[in-house]
Every structure is written in C-alpha cells, then in structure tokens.
Amino acid sequence: MRNKVTKAIFPVAGLGTRFLPATKSVPKEIMTLVDRPLIQYAIDEARAAGIKEFIFVTSRGKSALEDYFDHAPELETALRKAGKTELLQILKNTNMESGAIAYIRQHKALGLGHAVWCARRLIGDEPFAVILPDDVIAAEQPCLQQMTEAYEETGGAMVAAMDVPRERIGSYGVLDLEDDKGDLVKVRGMVEKPTPDQAPSNLAVIGRYILTPDVLKNLNRMKQGSGNEIQLTDAIADEIAQGRDVYGYRFRGQRFDCGSKAGFLQATVAFGLARDDLREDLLRYLHELVSVEKAAQ
Ligand code: G1P
C-alpha cells in the first residue's frame, strides 16, 4: 500500500499586485467568487481528496487569512439566537479542527519552489499535495481527488495538466511527453515558462501537484530558474533526471485562472450560474446584455 496523501501546502505568500488596489488590505485568497473566498474552494477540494493537514505558506499582510479559518464564537451565538441555522451551518463549514492548520512565513519572495521548500519540516518523509488557490477548478469529481486516485496506481510525482493554445503556453510550466495515454502522461522533462517556439508540447502544468520528499531535497539546492526564481517545475524535472517517475494528469473539469482579472470574472459568472438561487436572474441579465451588444454592432 502506498502512503496516503494527507498533507497539503497552500502557497499564499504572493502580493497579488494584479488586483491592486483591492489587495492593498485584502489578501488575494480572501477575494470572493460569489460568496466564498478563493481559499475556501481550495480547502474544500483538499478535504474531498482526504487531506487532513493544511499548511499555508504566507507572508506579511496575510493575517485576514488566519482570522478567516478561526472560529467566530460571537457570530455563531448571534446566528443561533436569531434561529439562522442555515447560515450557522455555512459558517461552521469554514471552521478548521484545532491543530489541522499551520502557517509558515516565506520571508522573501524567491519563487514557488522556495515557498514549498519553506514547509519542508512540516512535511517530513511522506508524499504531499500542493494546491495553488489561484487555479480554481470546477469539476464533478474534485481535481485533487482525481489525482490521488490516479496516484494510487502510479506513485512517483504527479502534476495536473491541461492542453492550452500555443500562444499562451509561455505562461506555464510545460511538459515534455514520453508516453501519452490520454488521462495519464508519462513525462520526460518539464520547462518553466518557455518561449512558444521552445515549448516541448502544448500541455501545461496547472496548480495541483502530488509530490514526494525527494522534490524537497531537490529544492535544497536553491537553483534559480525562470525569472531568477526558485521554480517548483525545475525541482520536479530534477526527479526525472534522477531516474524517478513523473506524471501529468489531464483532469476532467474546467479551470479558471483567478490570478488574472479576466479569469476571475469568468469564474464569477460560471459559479454564479451554477447556483440555483442566482442562475435564473443572472442568465436573464446576460441574455439582455448580449442582445444589447449585438444590436449595437
Ligand atoms: C505557476 C507555476 C507554473 C504553472 C502555473 C499554473 O506559475 O510556476 O509552472 O503552470 O503556476 O497556474 P505562476 O502562474 O505562479 O506564474
């Protein structure tokens, strides 16, 4: 039996400059899709995949995140007194068990690989997941759960993968494919943010990973890569060079890039439409908007 994946790292130290001025005082991960902060989607996905320990790699100015996961006794009492049981349940679903959550500071913005490395002592000697909350994935079966199931068969290291148009491939880690079996891809190399003509394929890394402690060892070398940052992609590629297996997993679901304004807006519309209480009104509004646009053309 393989070791179960029970720990996940959430790198949340980024400044979120693309969302200024909002992120001047609100961490990007607290920004809401409909009525839930981005980070809640990541936590729910992790829980569904069997994660029990949640490790946040944070930075200065992220205390709102810690408050968010704290219990709110006054609020709970007020809701209970008012008989608002549904809201009370919503609130309780955000509570984390004592000791299940840990915060580690990344003192310098040295890259995603460095952020993950900061959590090394909490990981110890077992496989772990990494979830980038900016990548929100709407799926019937949560993406990380799809991956942990596949990982039971493969072992090794695994990254979520998605085919993207060539002109956008330079924004991602890109896989060099050895064997493409559809869902599962055996990888023979990985490059972080290549120029489109140098990209080995159109298959991009999306922010879900299942990694081994060996990857953390590779990060010990603090090798600078793309953008002079310590890249997680490079530490995973080193695994292949050292003769260990790395897989890409084409997940089933729709990914939204909530690190960009356009992606965030699209996700807001999609998640709004998925809600029974909002769908009808939102759809009517969108139809009206489109017909006015068309008439103006
Ligand atoms: C990070 C990773 C990159 C991956 C991407 C997915 O890049 O470094 O390999 O493809 O997330 O969202 P970032 O978007 O933080 O620049």
Image (cartoon, rainbow, N blue to C red):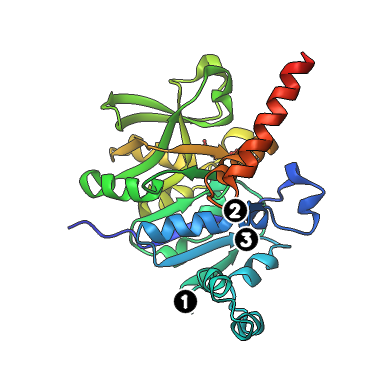
Few, some or many residues within 10 Å of mark 1 (<14, 14–19, 20+)? few
Under circle 1, the secondary element is: loop
Question: Cβ–Cβ below 8 Å for labels 2 and 1?
Answer: no
Give the residue type that dot 2 points to. Answer: Leu
Distance in Å between CA atoms under marks 1 and 3: 19 Å
- Please name which of the two marks, 2 or 3, marks the residue nearer to the observer: 2
Q: Which mark is residue 38?
A: 2
Identify the mark nearer the N-term, 2 or 3: 2
**Image position, residue 164 (x, y; %):** 49, 24
Q: Within the image, what quadrant is residue 123 found in?
A: bottom left
- Please name which of the two marks, 1 or 3, marks the residue nearer to the observer: 1
Q: Within the image, what quadrant is residue 56 found in?
A: bottom right
**Image position, residue 202 (x, y; %):** 45, 22
Residue at image mark 3: 58
Residue at image mark 1: 97
Q: Is residue 245 left or right of residue 71?
A: left
Identify the mark nearer the N-term, 2 or 1: 2
- Note whether 236 is above or below 162 in the view shown: below
Residue 230 seen: no
Give ligand 1's quarter of the image: top right
Instruction: In this rendered view, identify the residue nearer to me: 67 or 53.
Output: 67
Distance in Å between CA atoms under marks 2 and 3: 15 Å
Q: Quadrant of the C terminus?
A: top right
**Image position, residue 35 (x, y; %):** 63, 57
Give the residue type that dot 3 points to. Answer: Thr
